[in-house]
Each structure stands twice: as C-alpha cells, then as structure tokens.
Image: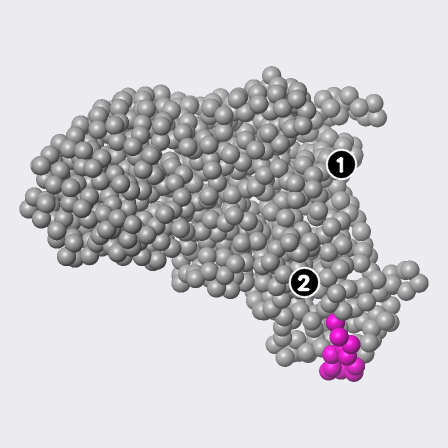
Amino acid sequence: MALSHTSAPKPTNMQATVTGDHNISVIAGDNSSVTINQGPNSQSQGDSTQTSHPFPLEECQEALRNHYRKRRSKVQVVPWNKEDTVDVHKIFTSVDLLAHRKSGSDFKGQPLQSITDIFDSSEECPDPQHILIWGAAGIGKTTILAKLLMSWTDRTSEVLKKYDLVFELALREVKKSQSLVDCIFSQLLPYDVGFTQDDLFEFIKDNDKVLIILDGYDEFEVAESHGTYSIYDLLNYKILQKSTVVVTTTTTRLADVTRLMDHDTRVEIVGFSPDNMASFVCNWFSNVVKRKEQGDALLQRISPTVLYTGILSVPFLLVLTCLLWEEDSNIPVSDQVCPLYDQLIDCLVKRYLTKGANPQSSGVIEQTLSSLGELAFDSLLKNTLLFSEEDVHKYCKTGHEAPVHLGLLLMQKNVSKLNPANQFSFSHKTMQEYFAGRHLANKLKSQDSAARKETLCHCFPNLWSVLQLDNLLVFTCGRLGQDATFIRSRLDDIYSESNVKQLEEEFYTFFKTTMPIKKWETDITLKGVTDNEGHEVELPCLGQWNDYPHKLCIYQNSMEVFLLCCYESGLTEEFAKVLFKRNAIQFSGANPRLYSVLSRVITDGRKKVEQLRLVNTQHYVLGSVLEQLHQLSNLTELNLRQSRLGQREVSCTTPDRLKRKLLTRQKSNFVVNDAAKAPSLLAEYLPSLRLLKKFVISWNDLGPEDMKQLFPAIRQLNDLEEVFLSGNDLTDLGKDVAELVASLPQLKVFKVFFCQLYLEELKEIASSLQQHCPNLELFDFQLNLVERGESTCIEEEDKQAVCRELNEGVEVCWETSSSLGGTGT
C-alpha cells in the first residue's frame, strides 16, 4: 500500500520552495512501498529504487551538533529571563536518578551517577533500547536532556559514541499531520542540507546507531497516528525498531505512555537531595562576599526543617526560593507551596510596574492575572499546556504583552519553517496549576453552596480526577485558607463513593500480616479510578521496594492529597482527625513534603500515636520527624525500614547473587551531610520511648560506627520484644550484639539477617539469647558468614551449631531466596 509523505523543501536561490512533483518510491522497513513527493532538487530513480548516492553522515552530524550547541548548550535559569543562562557543563549541581530496569515482568531499582548511564548494559537489561524518563514538573528533565545532548555533541561520553545520530524532538511542537522525518527536518535541520527526507529515512530505518529523544509526552496532543511513519508509530514500534528511543514525561501522562510504549528501562528523576540543595544555594550566592553571606543565611534558615520537606528537592522551587531571598532576605521561608508562589507573583509584578516602559496600572495587572487564571484553569482541565495567540487573546483582552513581560507566559515561534506563528505556555507547569488554583478559589468564594458543589463535582467528579489534579487541589486550598472546609467535604464524598475507605483496615494491618490478602482483588472494587477510556490511574513508584499492592497505593495517595490540602489551608484540626484516628502513622515511600508536615503536627497527637511506620523513604526526609520522636512517649512500634538513616557504602563478601541485589537497592553514593545526622538523632531520642516494644531499622546502610551509637540507646528500652537490624553492617560487633540482647529480657523476635556477622559471633549471640531472653520465639541470622572476611555463607551444618546454643522451640528462619527485602525482614 503506497502512502504519501511530504519532504522538507530545499532552497533555490536562497528561497525555500515547495514546488516540484517528482516522486520517489522507497522500500520501508516492513517491505511496503512509500511514495515520497520531492522538490526539484531530488533525485528520481523510478518507482522502486533508493537514492543512489551514499548518505552524507558527517554533514548531518555537524548540522545536528551545530543546532545543539546553539540551542541546548545554555540552560535558562528562570523561564522569564532569557538573558540569565548558564553553561550546561557548569550547571549548579546534579539531580538524583533512579533507574528501574526490566527483569522478567518486574523492574529492578538501580541508582545512576549520570544520565548517560541509562544506556549502559546490565545483567537485567543488556541492551537498553526503549527508555522512559519521568519526574514531577520542575524536577530537572530539561537540564538532564541538555547534558545528554551536549555529551554527544562534544563527544565526551564513551557510551554515546555508539550513536551516529541523535535527534531530540519537542513533542509539544508536533502537528497531527507530521511524520517523524518531517519533525526532524522542521525542528533540527537547516534548509540547505545536502540530503532529503527520503535519504534520511533510508539511512536510519534499519540502523541501530540512531538515538531518538522525544521530550515532553505530557505535552503531546496527537492522540493517535494520522500520518505516515508518525511519532505514534515510533512509540508503537511500527517503525525504526532498531533505534534507541528515549521518552520523557511528567506523572500526569505516565499511564498513557507506559501503555503505548513497552519500555525496558524506566528512570525516575528524584530531585535534589539535601547536599545537592546546599550546593545549589552556595553556587547561586557565590563569588561576592555579601552574596555568600546571603546564601549562608538562607541555608541556616531552611536547614532545620525545610531542607527535609521535599518542597525544595524540586529544582524549580529552589530557584524561586533563591530568587525571592535575593530580593528580600526577610521573606518568610515556608514548607507550604502556595505562599511561595504568592510571594513570587508579588515580586514579578513589583518589578514589572517599576519599569518605565510599562504604563499599565495595578488594576490592569490584576485583571491580567485574573485572565491568566481562567486560561490556566480551563486548559488544565483539558490537559492543554500549549496555546495559540488566538487562545491567549480570547482570555487576555489587553493582549499577550503584559503576561509575557511579567514572565508568566513564555512566547516562542513554532518550529514550522513554512507557517511560523507565536505560541505560548506558562513559564512552568506548576505555574499553570497555581494560576488555575487562584481562579478556582476565587470562583468558589463567589458562589453559594449549591453552585459551589456543582463546580467541585464538575472539576473533581471521581477519585481519578483527584489524583491527576492533586496540585490544583493543593493550590486551591492554599488560596482559600480556612474557608477550604467544603473541599475537605467533597474529598470525603469522593473517597466514600470510590470505596477507597474500605481499604483502611487492610492498609494499617499490612506491615503486621506482611502477606497480601486476596480479597483486595475480589471483594473490594474501587470506583472512579479510571479515565474515559477505562485506563486505571497510574501512580508514581513509591520507593525502590514498594510493598503495597496497587489498591493500597491508591489509598495512601488519596490520604496524602487530603492531608496536604488540610495542611496547605491551615486546617490542622481536620488533618489530625484523619492522621491520628487509628493511633498509627504509616507511609511507604510517600510524597516527601508529607514528612515535614508530620513533624509540624506530630505534637498535636503525641498522646495518641502508638505506631509510627515510615518505610521506603528515598528522599532523605526523615530528619525533621526524628527530631520530634521524644514527643511520642506512648509509642510502642517504630518502623523505619529502608529509610536512609545511614550512608555506609556496600562492602559485601557474600555470594554475587545477594551482592547484586544489595547494590541495586542502594539509592546513591552521594555523601549527604544532613542524612549523616540521622543515627545520632535516633540515638539521642530513642531512650524517651520507654514503652517501645517493636523497633525496626533494617536495610538502612548503617555501618559499625552508626550501630555503636545506637546500641546504648537501644539497651535502655527494656520492654522491647522485637528488634530488626537486618541488612546493616555489624562487622566485628558480635560481642556488642551479645551484650545488647542481654539487656532485653522481653525479647521475642531478633533479626540480624545479612549483617556481616560470622559463625563464632552468632554462637555467642545465640548463647546470650538463651541465657537472657527466655521468651525468645524467633532468631533470624541467615546469610551471614562462616569465617570473618570470607565469602562462604552459613549453611545447614553451621546453622545447627548456632541452634544448639538456643532453647528448644526457638524458630530459626531459613528461606534465603525470599527473605531479602521482605516487609518484615
């Protein structure tokens, strides 16, 4: 079947033309014939042959490299100031990357030091070819891609040298009728290249040395294929099956792209860890002494709590904070997002009005802000992020000049060389969500209760819409303040209608039972968790070892939205009602902001909280919570499994199988000064928890020195019945561990799975358990060593030697293949 495909025109006498009706037929990858209409400079070979001349690879490479040097070598620091740029190689600092490589039906987590590591082969994925990069708005996707492109352009990356050609396409610029090669010519190549579209297609169609980067799937408005060899066909693997394809998206379209693209590698951009935040601030205020003092003052202000909140782990929000602090170091620094944006808008408006060339009054500016809010709101509900000039003028009657000069809208020409036109977007996705929240809050304030209910039902008809538009809800609540109680009521109705509340019991008993309950899939049907096409809501990955089944993830995400809405609006009493009603606080890999919120309200429920379970924390955010531990005098369970309390590098002498698992479990190798305080904070406040019966700190990268700090504190907790130390390094601490258990007479469960202990130490520990812990029921010492410094693990005969030191009836775990990373180990 012959399909029509229009080539990019070649200029004649310095003018671009589209004349000519020569046809050339090429053989596509599936052996079908493709008819391509060529301009007058094309070579014709009849109806079935390829162009005869070899493809000018070096010319194409140089054209691409020139484009990237011009367009991508500089990073714009703030969206509204095109002059404020920094060389991509000198960008302030790096974000943390977490790759999940496909192994069978699962994805195994693995930290990355550099974005180019995504192309490295591994045992799980020897040939990464279809890669999805995702992260929250403002998390650093644009900068990461710029670094990647410049590494290829400057030939500084060995792994990227395998690619002859690298094409980066902005999906927001793709039109419905455009083919893939149309997009490449339109966005990346000059008019006067010495080859045509069919030349390029013939070269790349069966070429495994081609990398195609599709940036911004969340801004891709082409829902299905309408042309020949389109972007949609590329994502569906209908064309260029040997090429490597990288796609980026925010969480809003993660579900769509994962359904369309069978990726083998998924990379989460986690954001800034505290050391990177500190480096960013220091670099922002560098060089001048006075500015350095400003930076030091800002770090001092944000370090105690805000540094741990997650709000500043998003590079864009940290940029805003530095910008505002630079203008006025007396501004309040909060872990609430709405005040941050309010201050920024005030700052931009003040700067705009002081410019002599801007005659608009403050009243006109206020009207402009209101119009932007309406544009943001209407388009956000339609998931539209890119606007034509006609769209903007429909809302902003005074034109686009003021919002562009304010820095709230970005204006750019579209990439079409034949039909250029102005197009607009908000300076950042979160800026659009903020203005949409402003508009919705103002609209709700002006309505009576009946109209208000109708508006909320239209905006948030079901649970899917709540989880997809969570930032809109948070910004709206922030603008409403104490008046946001009716939103709390609407959320409560949605949670009841969806049946998500029925999961509460299963959620809070999950870490107690540790085994999935089958009735989650059969007895409980959640409603309103799919879009119009029946696709279920896609949730971000919650930590590297996400224990929860999907429905419990939905429950936790629903609770997070509710709690953040309450906190942003100042309704802390409503927050406490939900948070403390079960006498337990439990989150697994939650939104980082939530941990700061917990630290602020934890004193309100200090007499109620009996169980605190904060597990799978990957963002170094527990510091502010640990500082409040002494308030929880009634705590009976403290579970901090895999919560980044330590920074011990892996030193594994056990079999390669386990070593590989442990290496992929680690988050990163960054030295995080703030996280290093965690063991000492825990040691300081643990003795206050006199009623504690269960203590879990497994898989926290704690080393011998960390454990030496903790042992004296643990020894003071004489009522402890369960202690889990697995997955930390207890090298040469056998005697200390034996002394530890000797001070815990109520001990029933003791786990030191994979702790670098050796046989003689384990026998000494077992003897101490036998002598001092008469109630002992279980001792887990799997995957420890026979001899110090050797790689041979304890097997059946050595296990029996340890068991002989124990009282009869004590259970000994011996399921080595399934114990690593379980919910209880």
Q: Which residue is mark 1?
A: 83
Distance between the alpha carbons at the discs numbered 2 and 1: 30 Å
- Comparing 243 with 472, the one in front is 243
Figure quadrant of residue 701: top left
Q: Position of residue 628 (x, y in %)?
A: 36, 23
In the image, the segment drawn in magenta is 45-55
Residue 768, x across and y down, in percent: 13, 38
Q: Residue under circle 2?
A: 165
Does dot 1 land on a helix, a strand or a loop? loop
Q: Is residue 46 magenta?
A: yes
The x, y position of residue 356, in whole percent, is 83, 23
Kindly identify the residue that appears in the image at 61 percent across and 40 percent down: 429
Pick whichever, 692 or 718, lies toward us. 718
- Looking at numbered disc 1 in the image, what kind of residue is underneath it? Glu
Q: Furthest residue to the right?
A: 13
Front one among 565 and 186: 186
**Neighbour class for label 2 at 10 Å: few (<14), some, many (≥20)?**
many
Residue 163: give x, y in percent of width and height: 63, 63
Residue furthest left as drawn: 808
- In the displayed structure, does residue 492 sit left or right of residue 145? left
Find numbered disc 2 in the image and state the secondary structure of the residue it sits on: strand
The residue under label 2 is which amino acid type? Leu
